[in-house]
């Protein structure tokens, strides 16, 4: 089938403003949007720039604004998008070129919640044991692939880029609720600040955007309750 | 609005944002119940035509209703102004404008609260 793609392009060397460029490609309905983008890049216009890596929905490189919502280009099928498709870069970050945005602020927020196991207790002779129930507590938030679809769909983040955003909170949740972790005190300061969880207005865009189906808003509410119970 | 550096601002800490969030939940719940009570009394049990100065004077002769109305006033002003504070925090980025907006908001909330409290405390029927 023939589809029309309208891609928001921006070349920092020549453009002052982004512009929509129309392409026509021949694809199968069961192709992914990434296949259509590759068809353009490989056979029509080699200057089209976008990130991709694994192409199987696990590396988180090709999140973009597709028909107005954040999706992974490698996971969404042409037949679900219709024959007129708009593709734009993620909102809220500086565009480097075409569909490539500057992800550094995103990873700075991620690093700020210390997304690694913190435990200063002497290491046990065997592994640190955990019951299936204890593992289940944070199972949902282990699925994050750091694609930034949630954070860049969040109106609170659009309004104020100092908000650490849903993805950072999801990754804090991953360790806050891990029975082996002892680093809560080190994470609480940033989470409990003006730029932490209290900027979440429960809009649910993040939960809708997550390509991994993480219940992002629920995770944020979990962290709010955690802070409430820890401080009172 | 470009970020000047990639280092993130030091968190302010403190429990105020947490308290404000919790307060919004509790006050919101109370406001729904109390405002519904207010509507039932003023618009359903009593028709709007019978509500006049004498009606209010009779109602406020009972201290319970003065307390009820004061709680409704205080929660309404605080809940509402905290909501606006949050909107200002989200959307007013310029330091000076933000300081101006928040100060104006606090002054307005304070004035409304003081005026309402004064009426509730000093109201004497027939004066």
Image: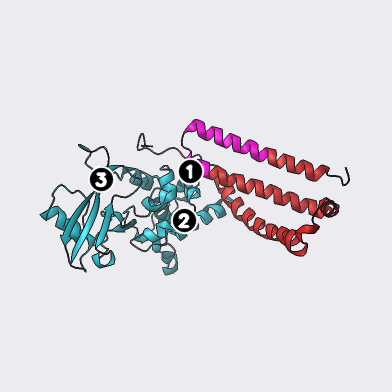
Chain colours: A cyan, B red
Marker disc for residue A203: 2
Element under label 3? strand
Q: Are marks 2 and 3 on the same chain?
A: yes
Q: Position of residue B120 (x, y in %)?
A: 79, 45
A189 is higher (above) or lower (below) than A223:
above
Q: Give the residue number, with chain letter if any, for mark 1.
A: B90
Q: Is residue A128 visible?
A: no
- Which one is earlier in the sequence, the residue at label 2 or at label 3? 3
What chain is tagged by disc 3? Answer: A
- Helix, strand or loop: magenta stretch: helix
- Sort mark 1 into few (<14), some (14-19) or many (20+) by Cα contacts within 10 Å: many
Q: Residue at x 83, y 44 (%)?
A: B123
Relative side of A60 to A119, left or right: left
Q: Nearer the viewer, mark 2 or mark 3?
A: 3
Q: Give the residue number, with chain letter if any, for mark 3.
A: A19
Q: Residue at x 29, y 49 (%)?
A: A89
- What is the C-alpha distance between the residues marked 2 and 3? 29 Å
A144 is higher (above) or lower (below) than A120:
below
Q: Magenta stretch: residue B94 in it?
A: yes
Which sits in the foreground, A31 or B22? A31
What chain is tagged by disc 1? Answer: B
Which sits in the foreground, A110 or A92? A92
Relative side of B123 to A120, left or right: right
Q: Position of residue B103 (x, y in %)?
A: 59, 34
Q: Start and end of the magenta stretch?
A: B87-110
Element under label 2? loop
* Image quadrant containing the N terminus of chain B: top left
């Amino acid at each position: 089938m023939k589809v029309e793609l309208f891609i928001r392009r921006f070349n920092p060397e020549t453009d002052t403003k982004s512009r929509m460029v129309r392409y026509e490609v021949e694809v199968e309905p069961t192709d992914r949007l990434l296949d259509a983008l590759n068809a353009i890049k490989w056979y029509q216009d080699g200057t089209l720039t976008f990130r991709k890596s694994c192409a199987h929905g696990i590396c988180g490189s090709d999140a973009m604004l597709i028909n107005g919502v954040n999706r992974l280009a490698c996971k969404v099928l042409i037949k679900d998008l219709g024959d007129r498709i708009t593709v734009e870069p993620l909102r809220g970050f500086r565009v480097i070129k075409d569909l490539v945005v500057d992800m550094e602020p995103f990873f700075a927020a991620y690093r700020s919640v210390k997304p690694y196991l913190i435990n200063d207790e002497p290491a046990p002779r065997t592994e640190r044991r955990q019951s299936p129930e204890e593992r289940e507590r944070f199972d949902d938030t282990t699925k994050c692939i750091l694609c930034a679809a949630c954070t860049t769909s969040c109106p609170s983040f659009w309004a104020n880029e100092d908000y650490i955003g849903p993805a950072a909170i999801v990754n804090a949740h991953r360790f806050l609720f891990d029975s082996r972790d002892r680093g809560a005190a080190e994470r609480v300061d940033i989470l409990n600040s003006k730029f932490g969880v209290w900027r979440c207005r429960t809009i649910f865009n993040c939960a809708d955007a997550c390509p991994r189906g993480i219940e992002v808003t629920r995770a944020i509410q979990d962290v709010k309750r955690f802070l409430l119970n820890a401080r009172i | 609005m470009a970020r000047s550096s990639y280092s993130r601002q030091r968190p302010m800490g403190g429990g105020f944002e947490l308290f404000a969030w919790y307060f919004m939940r509790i006050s919101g719940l109370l406001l729904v119940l109390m405002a519904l009570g207010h509507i039932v009394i003023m618009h359903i049990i009593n028709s709007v035509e019978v509500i006049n100065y004498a009606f209010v004077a009779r109602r406020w002769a009972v201290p319970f209703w003065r307390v009820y109305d004061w709680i409704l006033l205080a929660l309404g002003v605080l809940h509402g102004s905290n909501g606006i504070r949050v909107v200002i925090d989200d959307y007013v980025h310029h330091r000076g404008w933000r300081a101006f907006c928040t100060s104006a908001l606090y002054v307005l909330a304070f004035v409304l609260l003081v005026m309402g409290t004064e009426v509730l405390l000093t109201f004497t029927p027939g004066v």
